[in-house]
Image: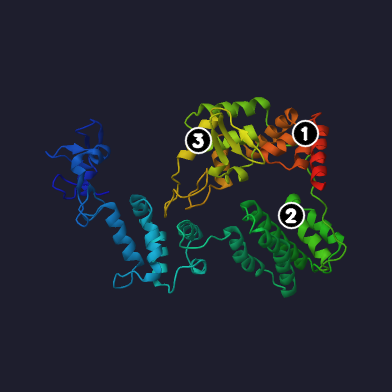
Amino acid sequence: MAVRLPDGALLCGSCSRVKVPCHVCGHVRFCKGRGPNGEALCRVCYAKHPIARRNCVQCGVLERLYHHGLCNPCALDRQLTGLLGGPDGTVRPDLEPVLQCLHRGDPLTLLYWLRKPVPRQLLSALAVATGPVTHEVLDRLQQPVKAVRHLRAALVADGVLPARDEHLAELERWLPRAVARIEDPSERQVVRGFATWHHLHRLRRNTGKQPVTLHQAVVVRREVKAAIQLVAWLRVRGTSLAACTQHDIDDWLATDLWVRYVARTFVAWSVRNRHAHRVVIPAPPRDASMALIEHDQRWGHIRRLVNGDGIDTTTRVAGLLLLLLAQPLSRISLIRVDQVIQTSDGVSLTLAAYPTDLPPPLDDLVLELVRQRHGNSTLGRSDDHPWLFPGTAGGQPISSRQLMRKLTALGIRARPARNTTLMELSAELPAVVLSRLLGLHISRAEKWTREAGSTRADYAAELSHRKALRKSQ
């Protein structure tokens, strides 16, 4: 932000880098402005002083100007028009929806965003392209993936682009590049067939019901990479997938124990489709002990989140849902505002077939998140979304990885914490109650109650069988 004299002239760099006592607060800080009588003002006090506000030379509004005598909205309009416009400064009609979408964001935030070279290059690349902005046009841009992803999310949230399954689209773009590393054409075709018919076909079939999750995308990438590594290892060994024996597979498993077992699905699919013969990768050995935390440690985390201790509301709510209701982070990140029900009796959250009553102070914290409708996105509208936990991309929820990073910073490991919560809840509640309130499948709920040594497992199974019998009648 420019540093100015009382008459609006710029303060030179040497003068603005001198530490002097501020006339208003008295602190010795860098001089960032001068008052009516030439008195020094620090950055904070200058921003609050009336002299910092002047009339915009373009729209006439009285506020603190950004640069060249322009207020924030006018400065943003000039920069966006310059980046998206042609040589004559005119924005072509196909880019008008993009321009209007960007104008709906916070002007000052967007101006700071445009100071970076990557956003400016991205908008300039759109300016030289032809035709309307589509998903395919954005896919072809030779720009950093993260910048394109944020712009795409803003355009989707604003209705400029139709919504699509982004994790599935990224997998479809990644697959050709990944299998291109396989030298042998026949083996390349086998791996492509595995990725297409075993993974992508299933994901495409279900994408109309539920979009592909980050975890599903990670599993697909991991198994395809394992398949590529296996055929490459066999090629170096002097054999191929079609000619390999169980001895070759056993040698493959002898090193990098856990990673090598990831190829199990690919080997089973290859044998089933006659690309390999009578070879098998067994299920990986599992540690007999389940990852848990101590009972006192769990309640210590709960007390810390209840008290706050400077922790933001998003992290407190996510942590309490994990430690009290055993909700996985992948499900917490996708909770919608309409799942929160407020009545005269209190606040409840619909996680499964029946709403779950929220104890204090979790109920007040959830309502606080509901009231905070403004998202965290830089581009486009950020308040028109259905999510209880909005993310940094326009109209998108926070990612489970981001929630995990927030909790890990507090020393809360998600999987052991959830296992401990499920174990303690399973010892107290019938499996059918866990299923109906927490969203667990009845078979998983029964497994947890047996693991916890609960005597209610038979009762839960009986209720489940009764329900199935009534449906069949």
Q: CA distance from mark 3 to mark 1?
A: 32 Å
Query: What residue is pinned by disc 3?
Result: 367
Q: Secondary structure at mark 3?
A: helix
Compare marks 3 and 1 and give the one earlier in the sequence.
3
Frontmost of labels 2 and 3 is: 3
Q: Quadrant of residue 114?
A: bottom left
Q: In the rendered view, does 114 fall on the left or right side of 153?
A: left
Residue plotted at (79% across, 46% down)? 471
Q: Secondary structure at mark 1?
A: helix
Residue most toward the left? Answer: 37
- Mark 1: which amino acid? Thr
Residue plotted at (47% across, 64% down)? 143
Query: What residue is pinned by disc 2?
Result: 262
- Mark 3: which amino acid? Leu
Q: Secondary structure at mark 2?
A: helix
Query: What residue is pinned by disc 1?
Result: 449
Mark 1 neighbour class, 10 Å CA radius: few under 14, some 14 to 19, many 20 or more: many
Q: Quadrant of residue 239?
A: bottom right
